[in-house]
Amino acid sequence: MAIQYKKFIILIIIILCIISLSMTIKNYISYQQIKKHEIENVLELGQFSDKISFHIDEIKNEKDKLFIRGWAILRGQDNTNIKHNILLKDKETGKYYSFEASNEKRIDITKHFNDGYNYDNAGFIVKIDNHFNMKKYDIGIQIILGEKKYFVLTDIKL
């Protein structure tokens, strides 16, 4: 009886390890995928806003990926639940491509503006397939707060 109980416990542990490993692999694969969306209608961009403050801290080529890191906020309101998309506007066709960014904590942004609003989630990093580096693009930033979308085009060219 004790031997069967030990075998059962070992079997449960093996099953849990397999489940854990498969979840880890699934998360890794989804992280590696680039979430790109071609914008068909300019209205999808949202409202142009001059209340957006931003800075692109770094654009880096690594192997087959292009990384863009920076921060962007909508001034004058809490940005706790902010989401960022990086926009690439094809200079030849005028088409927009949107890339979902991951948030990075930037408590320095809240301290810098010091206006009573929370901008701690202002940071972003996005990865883009390097084949987008073969054409000329204008870089834009889209901010999503709740159901509202805002965007700004930067002076930075890719």
Image: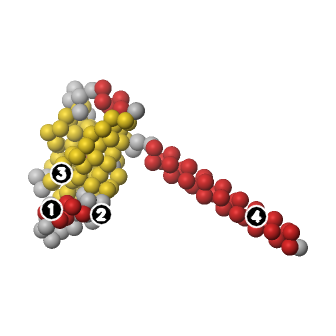
User: Residue at label 3?
Assistant: 54
Asked whether disc 2 touches disc 1, contact meaning CB atoms under 8 Å apart, the reply is no
**Mark 1: which amino acid?**
His
**Mark 4: which amino acid?**
Ile
**Mark 2: which amino acid?**
Asn
Task: Residue at 27% x, 26% y: name it.
Answer: 135
The image quadrant that residue 140 belongs to is top left
| Between discs 2 and 1, the one toward the N terminus | 2
Asked whether disc 2 touches disc 4, contact meaning CB atoms under 8 Å apart, the reply is no
- Between 88 and 133, the one lying in front of the other is 133
The image quadrant that residue 63 belongs to is top left
| Real-space Cα separation, disc 1 to disc 4, in angstroms | 54 Å
Disc 1 element: helix
Q: Along the horizontal axis of the image, is 22 left or right of 130?
A: right
Mark 3 nearby-residue class (10 Å; few <14, some 14–19, many ≥20): some
Mark 2 nearby-residue class (10 Å; few <14, some 14–19, many ≥20): some
**Residue 125: percent from left, percent from top:** 32, 48
User: Residue at label 1?
Assistant: 112
Return the residue found at the far bottom: 1
- Between 36 and 30, the one lying in front of the other is 30
Mark 4 nearby-residue class (10 Å; few <14, some 14–19, many ≥20): few
| Between discs 3 and 1, the one toward the N terminus | 3
Q: Is residue 135 above or below residue 108?
A: above
Q: Which mark is residue 10?
A: 4
| Real-space Cα separation, disc 2 to disc 3, in angstroms | 17 Å
| Real-space Cα separation, disc 2 to disc 4, in angstroms | 43 Å
**Residue 87: percent from left, percent from top:** 26, 42
| Between discs 1 and 4, the one toward the N terminus | 4
**Mark 3: which amino acid?**
Phe
User: Residue at label 2?
Assistant: 81
| Between discs 4 and 3, the one toward the N terminus | 4
| Real-space Cα separation, disc 4 to disc 3, in angstroms | 53 Å
